Amino acid sequence: MQNTKIKRLEDIRNEPLICLGKKSTTYSFYSKFFLEHDVVLEPDIEVETMDLILPLILNGLGIGFLPDLYVKDLLKSNQIQEIRMEEKIPAREICLVENHNFPPGVAAETLKKMLLKENGII
């Protein structure tokens, strides 16, 4: 079931938060976002990789910020709920750099195609 009540960052700051560690650029991104809205990001659980956040959420240990790509199927099947926020999270940018002297491997080429497709370039 979709949570229809729109929350503010202030409303969730006392909830158990799960996020990437303080040394990550994602932590810096969200910390800045919180501060811009006069809230300090104080996670209860810090993990090393993004793929560790979802299992913690699924086991009821807290809430976290994840890209739609990670959670769209779980949202559709009502295994998790999206918390709609009043504050809009700014878009992030990805810079793709290639060395044309070395052809990319299969994984790199697949990632490139996914990124280009997701952004409507191909």
Image (cartoon, grey):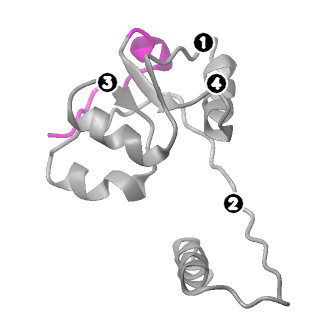
The answer for how far apart the CA atoms under marks 2 and 1 are is 26 Å
Q: Is residue 115 magenta?
A: no
Position of residue 73 measured from the top left corner of the image (x, y, whole percent)? 24, 58
The answer for how far apart the CA atoms under marks 3 and 2 are is 28 Å
Identify the residue at image location x=69%, y=21%: 36
Which residue occupies the foreground of this view, 12 or 113?
A: 113
N-terminal-most mark, 2 or 1? 1
10 Å neighbourhood of mark 3: few (<14), some, or many (≥20)? some
Which of the numbered marks, if any, corresponds to residue 62? 3
The answer for how far apart the CA atoms under marks 4 and 3 are is 17 Å
The quadrant of the image that shows the C terminus is: bottom right
Q: Is residue 41 left or right of residue 63?
A: right
Which of the numbered marks, if any, corresponds to residue 40? 1
Please tell me whether mark 2 sits on a helix, a strand or a loop: loop
Q: Is residue 4 magenta?
A: yes
The answer for how far apart the CA atoms under marks 3 and 1 are is 17 Å
N-terminal-most mark, 2 or 4? 4
Amino acid bearing label 3: Gly
Amino acid bearing label 2: Ile
Amino acid bearing label 4: Ser
The answer for how far apart the CA atoms under marks 2 and 4 are is 19 Å
User: Does the residue at mark 2 contact the one at mark 4 (Cβ under 8 Å)?
Assistant: no
User: Does the residue at mark 4 contact the one at mark 3 (Cβ under 8 Å)?
Assistant: no
Q: Which residue range is magenta in the image?
A: 1-14
Please tell me whether mark 3 sits on a helix, a strand or a loop: loop
Which residue is tagged 4? 31
